[in-house]
């Protein structure tokens, strides 16, 4: 007889050690997320492979595999209640449809730019698709409702910048995640009307630091200051996967939390360089009161859009009752040297008591209780039931168990009886099988579905770029990867506070990196090897980068396409033609020139930050100015400038326009600014 995947933990649950164990799903279906899905009877496993432009269908009994060609770069997949499979083709601006019992694509629906989120109504009649941008504007993404049978669009609603995930709530609403803004939007699924455009998740995470709350224990105020108040606030970033609790009362969001604190860059002598031993202190690990550069998290929201999260300075909830009725906020490992990073996909066990989290950067699955009762307290005192071994929790670890899988896990599915879970490892094109073994969840086998199509150097470089567990790239205590800041190989929209000033993460994807040396906003690194050696050793705590590793990472970065752009097919309209002429007249091409649209030199264009908590230090800039960035893919990289102070391209052109320090812009009319923006958006 097969045992439930979490049989030991659930036995404790039944004995009263944990709460929330009675929330069994009404429909009894499998739970899955990301690139993986199961048929209702768990007989067929579907995996979307973005490298191969295909969906693999695996018979879970015989392990026989069928390959079905779909659109370009299939990244997300959903199995509807009637067995229909919908596949979001990220670079195909389409959703592929696979009908039950058919081994070919049955239909392909046209949608928006970079479809990345899928949901379907309980009657399987309406398909909801989240598009990273609309077909006409990069400044907002959309939620689109389609007839699931015909693909006819019922409504399309702007939901905010760069949305990614979606989950349906039981009260006729959908929650949509905003990737770079780190927030949730609620939409009425009947009318398409946005009913809540965001939450107070930032304020709730930083209640003590912002002075909203005074922390206490046993109703007595605790003495300050707290670590969070000294290191600054922290912000959600990279919010993608969403999942609704079985009772419909909560939404779980996989996210990162990025610090606003001033970073210790691991350079013990000169802020821009100098001798010193490699250090893991630069970015550090995440814990209560001291989040790392970007700490993994599960952010919980109520069904009406209220953020139910810990305060990051004290790890305390809003109240003891509220704190216990949701998952812990920070995902902290209970195993030394085995970090958690890059939460990418979510699934629930059949009881709704445990979250299974596929961690893209740390190549593992974290199992976390959906309530904190029986978890370690915020003050490091374990309240674990005696029936559960203390090692199950560790000291301060919020994760119940970690299971290693393959490289780049991007999808997870748990069977309806809870005896098995499947994980799709995107970089290995394989499926790992998790089952209970000797009272613990274990990886019991792997099936390879396909072969690499990228060049070998790019394959190896991608694994290095996204790995938070390769000791050459980082110290496991830091638990970060290159992809932690360069999300999806692009950027996170976050401004990091360095000793020399604020610096926004630049996008790497499709920007011809090999042609844009020197590197960093300060330009202190003459080549990629020098840049990687410094960042990996001084900041990430890795043992070091070899020339071969640098070449592999460079090969991967060069292989990444420019993000899809709603203006890519813009015809040579009169407005764009005027913008081309204005680009020359304003002398933009003086600096932004050549195939990479940068002359790789330095300039002071009047944008230094001179007031506030973190200011620019021009004396620390080795070349007397900031490095000129590439303009390739400009439309998708908001906010703009090194300090992220311009939210739109037009705002950038208007900022300091009359000074003529960033091009000859003083004489431009507002209409001409609009023309120039129209051209810049096509780059």
Image (cartoon, rainbow, N blue to C red):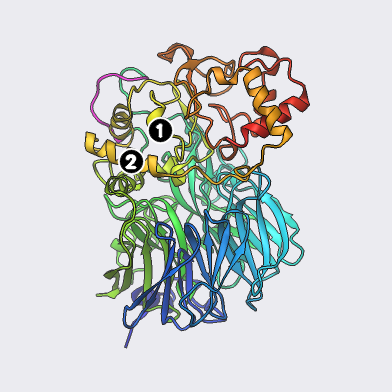
Camera-side residue: 392 or 401?
Answer: 401
Proximity of marks 2 and 1: CB atoms separated by less than 8 Å: no
Residue at x 29% of width, y 27% of height = 530
* Residue 275 falls left or right of residue 300: left
Q: Quadrant of the C terminus?
A: top right
* Residue 184 falls left or right of residue 367: right
Q: Position of residue 339 (x, y in %)?
A: 33, 51
Magenta residues, start to end: 272-280
Where disc 1 sits, the SS reads helix
* Residue 106 falls left or right of residue 151: left
Q: Quadrant of the N terminus?
A: bottom left
Camera-side residue: 487 or 352?
Answer: 487
Query: Few, some or many C-alpha atoms within 10 Å of disc 2 (few <14, some 14-19, many ≥20)?
Result: many
* Residue 17 falls left or right of residue 438: right
Dot 1 corresponds to which residue? 513
User: Distance of mark 2 from mark 1, alpha carbons?
Assistant: 10 Å
Residue 411 falls in image quadrant: bottom left
* Dot label at residue 555: 2
Q: Is residue 322 visible?
A: no
Between discs 2 and 1, the one toward the N terminus: 1
Q: Looking at the image, is 517 positioned above or below residue 637?
A: above
- Magenta segment, prevailing SS (helix, strand or loop): loop
Query: Few, some or many C-alpha atoms within 10 Å of disc 1 (few <14, some 14-19, many ≥20)?
Result: some
Residue at x 68% of width, y 30% of height = 577
Does residue 450 belong to the magenta stretch? no
Q: Looking at the image, is 338 positioned above or below residue 155?
A: above
Q: Position of residue 41 (x, y in %)?
A: 46, 84
Q: Position of residue 193 (x, y in %)?
A: 76, 58
Q: Looking at the image, is 68 positioned above or below residue 566?
A: below
């Amino acid at each position: 007889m097969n045992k439930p995947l979490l049989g030991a933990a659930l036995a404790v649950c039944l004995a009263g050690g944990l709460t929330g164990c009675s929330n069994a799903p009404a429909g009894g279906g499998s739970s899955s997320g990301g690139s993986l899905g199961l048929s209702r009877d768990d007989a067929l496993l579907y995996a979307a492979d973005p490298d191969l432009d295909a969906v693999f269908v695996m018979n879970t009994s015989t392990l026989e595999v069928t390959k079905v060609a779909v659109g370009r770069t299939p990244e997300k997949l959903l199995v509807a209640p009637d067995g229909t499979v919908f596949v979001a083709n990220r670079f195909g601006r389409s959703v592929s449809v696979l009908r039950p019992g058919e081994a070919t694509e049955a239909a392909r629906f046209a949608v928006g730019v970079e479809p990345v989120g899928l949901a379907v109504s309980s009657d399987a009649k309406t398909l909801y698709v989240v598009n990273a941008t609309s077909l006409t504007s990069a400044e907002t993404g959309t939620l689109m409702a389609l007839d699931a049978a015909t693909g006819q669009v019922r409504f399309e609603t702007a939901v905010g910048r760069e949305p990614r995930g979606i989950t349906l709530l039981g009260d006729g609403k959908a929650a949509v995640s905003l990737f770079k803004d780190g927030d949730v939007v609620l939409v009425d699924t009947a009318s398409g009307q946005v009913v809540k455009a965001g939450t107070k998740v930032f304020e709730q995470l930083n209640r003590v630091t912002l002075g909203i709350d005074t922390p206490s224990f046993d109703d007595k105020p605790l003495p300050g200051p707290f670590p969070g108040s000294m290191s600054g606030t922290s912000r959600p970033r990279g919010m993608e996967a969403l999942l609704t609790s079985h009772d419909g009362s909560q939404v779980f969001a996989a996210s990162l939390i990025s610090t606003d604190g001033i970073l210790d860059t691991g350079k013990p002598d000169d802020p821009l360089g100098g001798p010193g031993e490699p250090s893991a202190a630069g970015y550090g690990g995440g814990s209560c009161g001291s989040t790392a550069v970007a700490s993994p998290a599960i952010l919980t929201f109520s069904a009406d859009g209220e953020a139910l999260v810990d305060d990051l300075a004290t790890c305390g909830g809003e109240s003891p009752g509220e704190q216990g009725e949701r998952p812990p906020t920070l995902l902290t490992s209970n195993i030394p040297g085995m970090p958690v990073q890059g939460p990418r996909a979510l699934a629930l066990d059949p009881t709704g008591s445990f979250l299974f989290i596929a961690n893209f950067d740390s190549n593992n699955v974290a199992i976390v209780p959906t309530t904190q009762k029986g978890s370690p307290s915020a003050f490091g005192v374990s309240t674990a039931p005696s029936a559960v071994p203390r090692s199950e929790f560790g000291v301060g670890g919020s994760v119940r168990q970690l299971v290693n899988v393959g490289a780049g896990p991007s999808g997870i599915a748990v069977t309806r009886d809870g005896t098995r879970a499947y994980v799709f490892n995107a970089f290995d094109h394989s499926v790992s099988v998790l089952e209970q073994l000797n009272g613990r969840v274990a990886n019991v086998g792997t099936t390879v579905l396909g072969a690499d199509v990228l060049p070998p150097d790019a394959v190896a470089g991608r694994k290095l770029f996204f790995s938070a567990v390769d000791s050459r790239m980082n110290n496991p205590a830091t638990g970060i990867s290159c992809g932690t800041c360069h999300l999806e190989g692009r950027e996170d929209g976050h401004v990091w506070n360095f000793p020399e000033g604020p610096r926004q993460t630049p996008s790497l994807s499709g920007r011809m990196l090999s042609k844009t040396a020197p590197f960093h906003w300060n330009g202190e690194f003459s080549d990629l090897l020098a840049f990687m050696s410094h960042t990996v050793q001084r900041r990430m705590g890795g043992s070091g980068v070899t020339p071969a590793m640098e070449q592999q990472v460079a090969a991967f970065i060069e292989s990444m396409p420019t993000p899809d752009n709603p203006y890519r097919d813009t015809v040579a309209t009169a407005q764009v033609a005027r913008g081309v002429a204005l680009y020359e007249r304003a002398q933009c091409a003086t600096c932004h020139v050549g195939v990479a649209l940068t002359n790789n030199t330095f300039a002071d264009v009047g944008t230094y930050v001179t007031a506030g908590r973190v200011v620019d230090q021009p004396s620390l800039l080795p070349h007397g100015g900031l490095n000129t960035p590439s303009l390739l893919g400009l439309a998708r990289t908001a906010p703009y400038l090194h300090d992220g102070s311009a939210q739109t391209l037009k705002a950038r052109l208007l900022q300091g326009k009359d000074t003529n320090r960033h091009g000859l812009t003083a004489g431009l009319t507002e209409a001409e600014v609009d023309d120039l923006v129209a051209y810049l958006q096509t780059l």
